[in-house]
Image (cartoon, grey):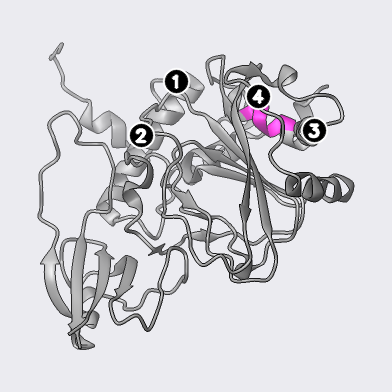
């Protein structure tokens, strides 16, 4: 049993929001995705990935900003992890 | 040498503050590009001690000196850094043909939260860079995000990213914080990029041609939303650019659409 992983970064905390960034990791060894290998997102929204058979297994928590750092920006906020098993 | 006519405008500076880079396509003469490639094949350029003044760092006739003496490069560097910057370090980066891997997306050095000062990294490409040669990946507008080095390595692709392709002799000047990485070279050609990092030694205040400071395009450039940034966070990006522009212009009243003024308005409260 091997796992393929898809990570989607969405515009808001909603799963049907637009995909802004993405990453793929392929445990089957058939593909070798890497940094900067494409400009076109694999799906328009997170729900589109569900419709294509990806299973959601983790989503970012909604964490309030640390006091005094409300205007700081850092990592992408809305990260969703999907898998396919074969 | 006078660089006055090559200084950046306020609109160009605002674009740098919003995007984190300033790109100069095909500005290096072919003769210098042709000398650079065999020199880079031969190894690293002679070392320079941290903090060496630019004017003392590279000997007359060297590739580095001739590159930095190009008026369009000198004018852009003066606009971004002010007078008398120093060299932090320099390095020739080579991506070998079919080497198989890409760098993880990263910011150089360590997390660097300065908003009222910044280092500049010059990247020089002596040859044409095509898509499959693995030109530098960078993420416009990522430079003010507070992340440390390769902690962003999980991100493979972002909407609106730049996968650099360019003609020979292109120079890109980057804010120290921008997310970037060398892409996988899937071609048969060695790819070269020569980088020099500069540190400012004077306050970076009105160091460019400020004649157009009141141009409405300044605010328009600072207000850009990048396609990879969450809508809510993109508003914070504009807020942070307002803070940076206030520092660069020494104008504490500068604002766009009341973003900074509104959240600081506490009538009658001293602290």
Q: Mark 3 points at which residue?
A: B71
User: Which chain hosts label 1?
Assistant: B
Residue A13 percent coordinates (x, y): 16, 61
Question: Could you tell me what secondary structure mostly forms the magenta stretch?
Answer: helix
Q: Quick one: label 4 or label 3, which is nearer the N terminus? A: 4
User: Which chain hosts label 2?
Assistant: B
Left or right side of B241 for B212: right
What is the CA distance from the residue labelled 2 to the residue labelled 1?
Answer: 27 Å
Near mark 4 (Cα within 10 A), the count class, few <14, some 14-19 or many ≥20, is: some
What is the CA distance from the residue labelled 4 to the residue labelled 1?
Answer: 36 Å
Is B44 one of the magenta-colored residues?
Answer: no
Is B104 or B177 nearer to us in this picture? Answer: B104
Q: Quick one: label 4 or label 1, which is nearer the N terminus? A: 4
- Residue range in magenta is B74-79
Q: Residue at left 55%, top 44%?
A: B21
What is the CA distance from the residue labelled 2 to the residue labelled 3?
Answer: 32 Å
What is the residue that sits farthest to the right in this orientation? B31
What is the residue that sits farthest to the front in this orientation? B42
In front: label 4 or label 1: 4
The answer to whether tags 4 and 1 share a subunit is: yes
Q: Residue at left 10%, top 43%?
A: A64
Q: Name the residue under label 4.
A: B48
What is the CA distance from the residue labelled 3 to the residue labelled 1?
Answer: 29 Å
Vertical order, B49 against B181 (above or below): above
Near mark 3 (Cα within 10 A), the count class, few <14, some 14-19 or many ≥20, is: some
């Amino acid at each position: 049993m091997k796992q393929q992983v898809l990570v989607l970064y969405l515009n808001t905390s909603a799963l049907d929001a637009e995909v802004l960034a993405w990453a793929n990791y392929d445990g089957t060894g058939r593909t070798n995705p890497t940094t900067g290998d494409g400009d076109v997102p694999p799906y328009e929204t997170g729900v589109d990935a569900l419709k294509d058979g990806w299973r959601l297994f983790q989503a970012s928590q909604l964490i309030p900003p640390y006091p005094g750092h409300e205007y700081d920006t850092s990592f992408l906020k809305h990260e969703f992890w999907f898998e396919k098993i074969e | 040498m006078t660089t006055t006519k090559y200084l950046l405008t306020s609109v160009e500076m605002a674009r740098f503050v919003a995007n984190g880079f300033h790109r100069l396509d095909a500005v290096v003469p072919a003769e210098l590009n042709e000398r650079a490639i065999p020199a880079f094949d031969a190894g690293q350029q002679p070392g320079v001690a941290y903090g060496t003044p630019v004017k003392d760092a590279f000997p007359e006739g060297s590739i580095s000196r001739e590159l930095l003496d190009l008026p369009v490069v000198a004018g852009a560097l003066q606009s971004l850094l002010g007078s008398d910057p120093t060299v932090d370090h320099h390095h020739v980066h080579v991506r070998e043909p079919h080497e198989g891997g890409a760098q993880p997306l990263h910011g150089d050095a360590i997390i660097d939260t300065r908003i009222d000062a910044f280092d500049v990294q010059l990247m020089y490409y002596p040859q044409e860079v095509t898509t499959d040669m693995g030109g530098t990946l960078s993420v416009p507008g990522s430079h003010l995000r507070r992340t440390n080095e390769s902690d962003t390595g999980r991100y493979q692709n972002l909407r609106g990213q730049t996968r650099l392709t360019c003609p020979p002799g292109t120079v890109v000047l980057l804010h120290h914080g921008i997310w970037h990485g060398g892409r996988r070279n899937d071609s048969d050609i060695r790819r070269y990029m020569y980088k020099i990092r500069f540190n400012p030694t004077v306050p970076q205040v009105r160091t460019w041609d400020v004649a157009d400071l009141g141009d409405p395009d300044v605010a328009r450039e600072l207000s850009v939303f990048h396609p990879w940034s969450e809508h809510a966070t993109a508003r914070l990006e504009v807020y942070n650019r307002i803070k940076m522009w206030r520092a660069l212009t020494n104008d504490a009243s500068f604002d766009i659409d009341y973003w900074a003024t509104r959240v600081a308005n506490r009538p009658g409260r001293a602290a």
